[in-house]
Image: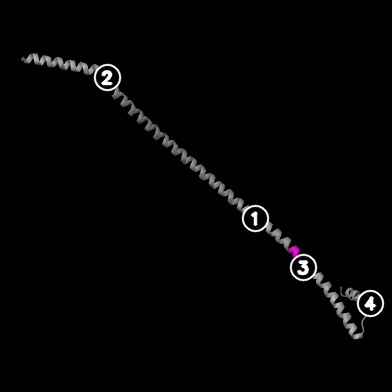
Amino acid sequence: MNINFTLISQAIAFSVFIWFTVRFVWPPLLRAIEERQKTIADGLAAGERGRHELELASQRSSTVLKEAKQQAAEIILQAEKRASEIIEEAKKAAKEESGRIVAGAKAEIEHEVFSAKETLRYQVAELAVAGAAKILRREVDSKVHADLLSAIQEDLK
């Protein structure tokens, strides 16, 4: 065997191997690598967009939270104001009701006093007639008795 022939045949075989690799193997590998690079780049871009959207969502949520807290404070303030108004209205209604109750009680007391006076006058008149009858030791007839009671009642007024 000749060393030159071996070297030349190896060089030719290596050249054919390189040509075959460049022609048939290299393009699919490059396409796969480019697709992989594109997928990675898209993933990184999507991650960046997600991070940016997260920041925007965080800002929006903090704004909404501030507005909600402000609205809650306003609602609480309005509720407290309404509660104090209701309390004042209840106090006013209670005062009016107590005035009506006191007036009704006074009227009832006056009526009871008048009724008690009338009953007392009648009883005093009966006692006076009974006392007079005992003094006279005789019974006064009922017509005279009624006239006497009326007269005594008039005198007591």
Q: Which residue is mark 3?
A: 109
Give the answer, above or below, for where 37 lies relative to 58. Answer: above
Real-space CA distance between mark 2 and mark 1, rounded to the nearest whole angstrom: 89 Å
Give the answer, above or below, for where 24 lies relative to 134. Answer: above
Real-space CA distance between mark 4 and mark 3, rounded to the nearest whole angstrom: 34 Å
Real-space CA distance between mark 1 and mark 3, rounded to the nearest whole angstrom: 31 Å
Give amino acid for label 3: Ile
Give amino acid for label 4: Val
Give amino acid for label 1: Glu
Q: Which residue is mark 2?
A: 27
Give amino acid for label 2: Pro
Crowdedness near tag 1: few (<14), some (14–19) or many (≥20) residues, C-alpha within 10 Å: few
Q: Which residue is mark 1?
A: 88
Give the overall secondary structure of the magenta segment: helix
Residue 145: x and y in percent read: 92, 77
Real-space CA distance between mark 2 and mark 4, rounded to the nearest whole angstrom: 149 Å
Q: Secondary structure at mark 1?
A: helix
Q: Secondary structure at mark 4?
A: helix
Q: Which residue is mark 4?
A: 144
Q: Secondary structure at mark 2?
A: helix
Eye-nearest disc, 2 or 3: 2
Residue at the left extreme?
A: 1
**Any mark on residue 80, and which?**
none
Q: Quadrant of residue 41?
A: top left
Eye-nearest disc, 2 or 1: 2
Foreground of the two, 118 or 54: 118
Considering only order in the chain, which callout, 3 or 1, is on the residue closer to the N terminus?
A: 1
Quadrant location of the N terminus?
A: top left
Eye-nearest disc, 4 or 3: 4
Q: Secondary structure at mark 3?
A: helix
Q: Which residues are magenta?
A: 102-109
